[in-house]
Amino acid sequence: MVHRAHEVLPHRHPRRPRPMKRRFRKALATPFPEAWRDLLAARVSWYALLDPPEREKMENLTRMFLSQTRFEGAGGLEMDDQIRVVIAYQACLLVLNLGIELYRDVTAVIVYPSAVVKAGSRGISDGIVDDGAFPMAGEARLHGPVVVVWDAALRQARHPERGHNVVFHEFAHKIDMSDGAADGMPPLPSRSAQLEWHATMEETLRRVRSTHATSLDPYAGTNAAELFAVATEGFFDAPAALRRSVPALYTMLSDFYGQDPATRRRAGR
């Protein structure tokens, strides 16, 4: 996947809200299964940290997401509710206060049982390119599907303290791509917000590339698009560490996502 260089985009007025799609109304008319709540409580460690209004909103988003997104098993994997619900629920945390509209370009989720070996060039960090085969845990394609490796997605949902989450990473890319470019800048409400975003991202990239003295994985230094995806993983999975090491980035992500995971975790909810 090729990422464009990071740039400040011209301000575009936010789209008017669209009427709720018929399939969304149908999905929301069906109660959220109790078995799915039990499944999430057992498989997603941060499920217990959500308060009742957040859980209700997440259940609505999850049903809408599942109603518009096709799941396909690959590599011999057969789809079941556990796979669909655990992946969808994690994806929906990112848009809890943004809206399902940001995923309108997610045509399908392709799920492999374990890491896929992919050939071709890939960025490692700071412009370095590796041409060898490498194991892939996930991929997001512009105007196309998201690829997720199931064993990684399940393991990371259970152990957020490790700071890696393939679902958060790939769906952050899709949020970034929702304005038509994979440049590390998601849709923002004003030019001033774009300028602030650009400055914070550039400063963070400089720090990651020069000293690595942050809580972010060095892969964040590849480019702005990967920085946004890696930072989103840290924001939701290891928020206290990100807030300590790169406070300006944490505040910017908190403003964008409309969430404060560090406070949520400190409160034990």
Image: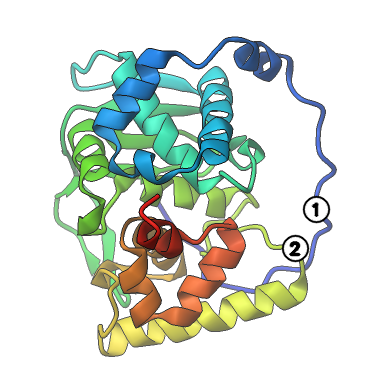
Q: Which SS class for mark 2?
A: loop
Q: Residue at position x 40%, y 20% from top? A: 71
Residue positioned most to the front = 267
Residue at horizontal 58 percent and vertical 10 percent from the top: 30
Q: Position of residue 192 (x, y in %)?
A: 74, 78
Q: Quadrant of residue 89?
A: top left
Residue 84 can be seen, yes or no: no
Left or right of 68 in this view: 221:
left
Mark 1: give few (<14), some (14-19) or many (20+) Cα within 10 Å.
Answer: few
Rendered position, 116 above or below 176: above
In percent of width and height, residue 237 lies at: 32, 56
Do the numbered discs 1 and 2 sit on residues whose CB atoms are within 8 Å? yes
Q: Residue 224 in the image: x percent, y percent?
A: 45, 70
Sequence-first tag of 1 and 2: 1
Q: Quick check: 8 left or right of 227?
A: right
- Tell me, yes or no, if residue 12 can be seen here: yes
Q: Which amino acid is tagged 1?
A: Pro
Could you say which disc has been placed on residue 189 in the image?
2
The label number, if any, that marks residue 1 in the structure image: none
The residue identified by callout 1 is 14
Q: Is residue 238 above or below residue 211?
A: above
Location of residue 117 by image quarter:
top left
Label 1: which secondary element: loop
In the rendered image of this protein, does residue 163 appear above or below residue 64?
below
Residue occupying the point 57% across, 83% down: 199
Return the x and y of residue 138 as percentages of the image width and height: 30, 43
Q: Is residue 73 above or below residue 252?
A: above
168 left or right, relative to 120:
right
Q: Amino acid at mark 2?
A: Pro
